[in-house]
Image (cartoon, coloured by chain):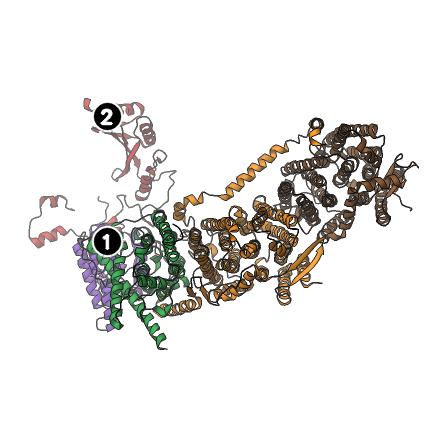
Chain colours: A red, B brown, C orange, D green, E purple
Amino acid sequence: MSKLKKENKVLDKLKSVFNLSGEVKRKQRIAVKSDSKHVSSILLFLKNQQGFIHLNHISCVDWIEENEFELVYIVWNPKTKLTVLVHTRIARENPVMENIDTIWDQANTYEREFREMFGIEFPGLVAPKEFILEDWDDIPPMRKDFNSQAYALENFATRPGREDAQDVREVIQKRSGEELPDFAKKYSRD
Amino acid sequence: MVITPVHYIIAPLIAAFAIPLLTKIHKDAARVVPGIVLFYNVIVSFVLMKHIREHGMISEVLAGWQAPWGINLVVTPFTGYLASMVSILGFIIWLYGFRFKRTLKGGEIKFYEILQMMMIAGSIGIIITGDIFNLFVFIEIVGISAFSLTAFYRSRDGAEAGFKYLLIGGFASAFLLLGIIIIYTQTGSLNMAQIAERMPDVPQQMKIIALIFFLVALGIEAEMFPLNGWAPDAYSQAPTPTSATFAAVVSVAGVYALIRVVYTMFDVEGVNNYLMIMGFVSMLIAEIAAISQKNLKRMLAYSSMGQIGLVLIAFGIGSKLAVFGALFLMLNHGVIKSLLFMTGSYFIYNTEDKKIKSLNGIYKKLPFVSFLFGLGALALIGFPPFSGFWSKFYILMSAADEKYIFLIIGILLVTVIELTYYLRVVGRIFFAKEEGEPASHKPSVNAIIAMSSLALFIIVIGVYPDLIMPHIQSAAEALLDKSNYIQQILSLN
Amino acid sequence: MEIIAIILLILLVGSFLTYFVDSFNKKWTGTTAFLIVLITAGIFFTKIKSGYQFNFQLAGLDLQWGLTDYSYYFVYIILGLSVLALLYSIKYMEGKARLGYFYGSFILTVLGMLGVVISQDFVSLFFFWEIMTWASFLLVIYNAYYKIKTKGIKYMIFSAVGAYAMFTAIVFIHVHYDTLLISEAIAKGAFNFEQYIYIPIFLLLGFGIKAAVMPFHVWAPPAYAKSPMSFTTIFSGAMSKMGVFGIGLVFTSFYLSSNPENFFWVRTILGWMGGITAVMGTIYALIQTDAKKLLAYSSVAQLGYIIVGLSTGTQLGVMAALYLAVIHAVFKGALFMVAGAVEKQAGTTDMTQISGLIRKMPYTFVVALVSIIALAGVPPLGGFVGKWLLYEALITESNNYILVVVVFFSSTAAFMYSYRFLFGLFLGQEEKETEHVKEAPATMIIPMIILAIIATVAGAYPGLIFEPAAKAMQAIGFQDVTWQMSSLTNVWGDTTDLFLIAMLIFAVFIISFVFLTLKGLKKTRYVGTKDISTSGELPKEWENLTFQLDFFKPFERAAAPLYKMDMNKIWKDLGKNLEAFFGFFRKIYTGNGQTYALYIVIFLVVLLLFRDVLFS
Amino acid sequence: MEGIFIKILGAFLTAILAFVVGMLYGGLRRKVIARAQNRVGPPIHQNFLDLMKLQAKRTNIAHGFMGHMAPVWIIIAAMTVLMFIPILHGNLWFENLTMKGDLIFLLYMMVFGSLGMALGAGQSGNPNSAMGVSRGLAQLVGFEIPFFLALIALMIQFNTTSIAVLMDHQEATGRWIIVDNPFAFIAALLASLGMFRYAPFDIVGAPAELASGPRSEFGGKYLGTMMTGGAVFAFIKLVMYVDLFLGGAGNNNLEGLAGTALGLVELLVKTFLLYMIPVFIGLVTPRFRTEQAIQFFWKWPTFFGILAIVWALYKNGTIG
Amino acid sequence: MSEIKSIGIPTPEEIKQAQIDFAPRCTSAGRVNDKETQGMVEHILNFARKHSLFVVAYGTGCGAIEIPATMTSRYDAERFGIRGAATPRQADVMLITGYLSTKTLKRVIRVYEQMQDPKYVIAFGSCAINGGMYFDSYNTINALDRYLPVDVYISGCMPRPESVIKGFVKLQELIKNGNAGNGEAYRSDLDWYRKNQQKVIKNWDFPDNYNW
């Protein structure tokens, strides 16, 4: 424990200020979970008070079973070399998250991507509507309920023989007459 | 000879007394009678000019006393020329101001008309009198009319300007009287011809001191720097016809008095240089001051002072060509500046304030007046083919004859300054975007006639100066021929 | 009455007549003006021959009007260009306000210019010079609604300074040499730079300002650019040549002189001033974004060449100057007309606003192309001849090797703005804003085409211009001027045959054009300017593919030191400081009566104290 | 009559010679560069194949009249300049219509083509084209100055503006002008680097920056014709340099065909050697920025140009 | 994961139809340049075309990095007359280097149409052939020759420079035989291509007229 003094200090500080749960994952890495309402204040606090001046990344995970999106904000302190991951969850229906590109300009890019790929709305986000996709008219493609294969089959002409995207391993096995190696079975589609 | 020089004086005096009475009979009499009188003066001028061309100069004595003891009126080609010029311009200014009353806010039309008439008559008196004390009297007549006219609007600014004028005019009178006293004690005469004759006997110091008093006193009348502080205020506060009169008539009379004293009475060395230097300084300072003026009438006033400076320079050069140029310029300045004041008055009448700024695009409202103003401005700067060109041309020629190279360059540079501010105004009038909607007062018929005749004069003389040049030539000769003047007056008796 | 007086009277009366026609019927104003000048030109060219003289007296002065071969040469420019400009003007000015004012002043300007060249005495010269100046001033401020205070006045102040410098010189000629006749003054050696050096210097100053020589050129670009284009045509084409005319007159004594060493300094300085004018005019022309301004600066540069040519004083040099005077009037007249046509049809000449007019205004473009080629001095058009003469004069005759490089630099950099003009207005992207633009009306096209034809013919047969130019040179002191109809020869005997060049170029042109057109004729497609390879991107309507701003930025960076010398700023600062200085003097008039009284007293006391110094 | 016929035929022969040699030199350049980079490289006749292919394109796109005309200007300039430069001195067949070149005329005629092509490029509306033109014109102003200085030096040293007279002079004295005025040669040589537009002065068509600049909208027959013109132009420039500084070619005493052949060989050797200078410099240098290129020309080359003039004046007896 | 629908396998009829759709456009039948009809002049010109291939490399995917390698001294593509061209106007060959997203396809079509006849297309890698590992991606097209006529496919993921050169040599062979250059086929079958293209590119804003 004594080794992770810096980490614990930051975590304690955060816990004392905000109502959140969290843990020190490992050296130089702290993960906290918070309500989506408080994320911006936590980030501001980290940036202004604790010296986490750099936003590394924002990532989004679609927890379709729990009907939630998880957003992870990763910030970094260049002096202490600590990284804080701020996890938060928002509802999957009409997802709305607070816009933080006023805190870090580069957040704008991530938020544009989430808006396009997950359909999360960021009120007050000023950016062109289209980011990577052009003329997209389906549900956002990174959501897990989006069926990419079906979409591809429906929209793109497919080379004959590849319509169903069969698992070629069996064919290989049949042709070569060899047993499939274990690692190949492990990643089997079924 | 039925018409004599005394008619110049008598007619206005009688009319001045008669007008209040006639006003009782018909209220328009106050406006018509001065016109008749001034027109009569014009006739007198023509008759007298014709006479002196045929028979030589006239010296009329008053009340039977022969010169040098009595008061005498002298019409030489020189004085005759100036008197004619003054009377004609006076008449045109009257014509212009004929319907003047409508613009009046305070004051009474009859006083205005009487004072205006007296001012012109007094100026003529200054020019034709041969007696130095009489000169003083006429200067006082002009001065008093001028003070009252300056304060005619009874506004705060007008009163202030009138008071300033009065104050400085007081200095002028005092110094003039001092000078006259010194001269009288030394020569025992008040007749200019006789003074001139006896002048060589006067002690040098006395002569110079008397001259200095004359120079300062008459310098005030002739608007010489630094004695001309009254002028901008007086010009800008007086009614416009009066401003025109100041420029065209009163200043001419002032310059005449100065020149008469310097050229005829005294024979002091260095006066010419003095006139030249002071003339140049007046011109320079006046034009410099004019360039930053925001008020149109003040700008024109400073411009007048500059032009008078140029006249003084020419008189300072003193050669025949220079005097010729100076006389020509006096005429041109009278005509052109009257035109500018007349047209400028219509601009001011049509705007709320007297600012140059508010003249923007007034061309569209008053095309003819603007055209005349532009013409006047170009003529005053001295562009051919207008009359202003020739006078400036001859003055510069005479300066070149005397090899005053820096003077020439100086005059031309000052002309550039003059050109700058005049063309700025012209540019504003014709080309700037108009702002606001000032009331449109179209010029009346009499004003149009007055202004057109002046403009016509400018163009005609500009294209064909030979029309007027012989008269000016003889006038210049008469001025320079001092001994002839003395002899004629003293032997004619 | 003398025929010359009648001609001037026609113009004078015509000026007023036009003014009144305008208030009568606006449609006929332009036509009236055109007819008046056309009639004048007709009478002039039929009735008056070179050598004509008319003596008379005015205002006590002996005056003389007349025409030498030299002045007749300039009459060609003035009247020829004026007639074309007025023909052009009819449609160009249609629908504008104050036509009477415009045409009245226009004719007065023509009167002034004609007067200047027919004057054989200084008083008339100055008289007409001033008429020309103020009449043109009225036209310069015709368009400048906003910048009246700076733009128009600048022109007038510079002109006035020049005119007054000239005037000073004139009075001194009168004083020192007791003559007002130009020929007598030259004969008496007034311009010989021996005694009274200031006389020719002042005269050169006066003429030089009109010819927009280096430190005094600042009035020219705004004045040229702001005037209505139909007037700029003669403003730049003919009126600036009046300065050239005058310099030629003054230099007559140089050309005649038996000891030209006297003139070494003046011609060196003037030549360098011309060279620097050319360079500065050029480099400022190529950073302009307004086509009119570009042309205006270019005019300044071209006048620099003419001055250089005059200052060489050699046969080829003066021939170059006179030839350039005509050819510049021709192509620059045409170019200003082009700019005017574009302005009229497209509403602006700002090259950042419009582009790609070539399909909409093909005839205008062809004229612009021909004129620009002539301007750039590329063979086989007329401009090359002038450049050739100038270089050969500088290299072979006047041995001014560095100056020739300066001139060459200027004329090479002129390619840049030549291209910029064509590209900016006619080539490049066809934007939606210019879709409505149509070809200019015929009366505007015809004068342009006439000028373009002249520029073309002058390339193959420069002798047509050399002939009157040679006569003119003989009138200002050269003997045995040689010239050929269609070839150029320098003193070393090297010949360039222009007719053969023109024929060769024409033949190659036809062959390669036919080859290129006929080959795969059916499979060659003409597409719009939106169809360009933009890395596969499809240009959107709103996307800006026009490259117009900072067009020559690399050159600007490379030549940055040259751009630091901004004459305009120096003059502006001077003006501001002077006004502040004047403001100080104005404070003398405090408006307080007591102060004034104090002045009087002090003045009296001072006079009394210094009475012995002042008077005696 | 026969003389004229021979002249016209000779002019055609010259044109063909210039074309063939120019194209071959282009191919040679590619080969040399390839060998220098330790690879095989294209065959020497590669440029002919390229040209043939371009001319054989079935479809062509032009962006309007000026775009269509752009190659025409280049051909005009190339042919006219060619006709003014003597290929072989005193040879009956290669005198090119005997239009002995005036240097100032040549100077102006040589920019004719670039300007015409610039107009065509301008009409395409491609911003890259205009940008390339802007750079090209700026560079032109750069290298014309030293080149002109060198020419002036020659003019005043030998009192002529004609290229033919200069050749006569070299033949008469037996001394090349490179010996008489080496500084002029240096200045002109440095200027020629800009004229050839190889690296480091290939800023006009810089492929990675401007997508080949003015040419970006030309393909097929237009590009092919431009290539032809460019090849002829390269040859002309080389011949001009040889004529001016290296004594020209064909000054042998042999009669008839042998003399002509020897002269041509001499010409080819000289031009080839001269050509290799810009090629080798281009091989080892990266690209300048535009302003750097201009400033380069205004520094040392201009200095050498002025030195050349001083030298010429000294030799001429005007000074010193 | 259960929500993902299973994808129906196309019926044999559909497969047949698809094969018919592809058939005429994948082979070299119906070209303007049959070997039988090819005259002497055309033969010579084809020789020139074969040896002078100006390449516009559309770096769509990972194959873009293989092109510079191909041009280096080690592989020296220039000896075949292959040379980079900066713009489609000058180019003969277009290289599609790798997977092609729908967004890129639009640009590729534009570039292809701006090239001048005769023009050739070489497609790199399995992604360009059949979608490769992105076969089920929502934005990668699977069969390039549905949208553009392709002359040569180079298999591999990615093909090495040797393969690329092999592909070029194959193309040269085709050119020599007069079997390459599908510009005119594209033009004549434009409706079919347009239909396919418009299916992928939703917001179709190309100019109406086809621009060679």
Residue C527 visible to an observer of this rendering: no
- Label 1 marks a residue whose chain is E
- Which of label 1 and label 2 is nearer to you? 1
Task: Specify whether C271 is left or right of E30.
Answer: right
Residue C179: x, y in percent? 66, 52
Q: Amino acid at mark 1?
A: Thr
Q: Residues within 10 Å of mark 2 (few under 14, many from 20)?
A: many
Q: For the point 22% across and 65% down, which residue is it?
A: E175
Query: What residue sits right under mark 2 in the picture?
Result: A7
Q: Nearer the viewer, residue E25 or C374?
A: C374
Q: Which residue is mark 1?
A: E97
Q: Determine the secondary structure under disc 2.
A: helix
Q: Residue furthest right?
A: B64
Q: Residue furthest bottom?
A: D1
Chain containing mark 2? A
> Mark 1: few, some, or many residues within 10 Å (few <14, many ≥20)?
many
In the displayed structure, B78 sits above or below C127; it is above
Both labels 1 and 2 in a single chain: no
Separation of marks 1 and 2 at Cα, in angstroms: 48 Å
Q: Is residue E5 left or right of residue C223?
A: left
Compared across the picture, whether D31 is left or right of D176 comes to: left
Tell me if residue B379 comes above or below residue C42 in the rendering: above
Quarter holding the N terminus of chain A is: top left
Name above or below for residue D19 compared with residue A22.
below
Q: Is residue D98 visible?
A: yes
Horizontal and vertical percent position of residue B316: 71, 39
- What's the residue type where badge 2 is placed? Glu
SS for dot 1: strand
CB under 8 Å between callouts 1 and 2?
no
Nearer to the camera, E1 or A88:
A88
Residue at horizontal 65 percent and vertical 59 percent from the top: C65
